Amino acid sequence: MTFKNWILEFIDVNLPIGDLAKDVNFDNNFPNTSDKEVISEYLQNQGAFKDALETFEHSWKLYSSSR
């Protein structure tokens, strides 16, 4: 399961991970991959705020531990 597919499971969660899931859902260009570097670079290139990058890092740890 890619990170994108995984994060979308949290779309109804009222926490930062849910906010990230909503952002991913609305971004048709979000990478559908399991490559952390590709996603991280994409977020940085899109001008993601520090909080969003921190949420991604935390979410990635959860994602990695669930695989």
Image: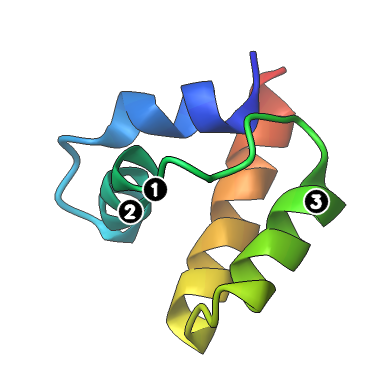
The disc labelled 2 sits on which kind of residue?
A: Asp
Rendered-image quadrant of the N terminus: top right
Please state which of the two labelled residues, at mark 2 or mark 1, is closer to the viewer: 1
Residue denoted by label 3 = 38
Marks 2 and 1: CB-CB under 8 Å?
A: yes
Image point (55%, 49%), residue name: 59
Image point (31%, 61%), residue name: 16
In the rendered image, the vertical position of residue 54 relative to residue 25, given as above or below: below
Between 8 and 28, the one nearer to me in the picture: 28
Rendered-image quadrant of the C terminus: top right
- Label whose residue precedes the other's in the sequence (1 or 3): 1
Residue denoted by label 1 = 27
Q: Where residue 54 sits in the image (x, y, percent)?
A: 56, 72
Quick one: which residue is furthest to the front in this view? 29
Q: CA distance from mark 1 to mark 3?
A: 15 Å
The disc labelled 1 sits on which kind of residue?
A: Asp
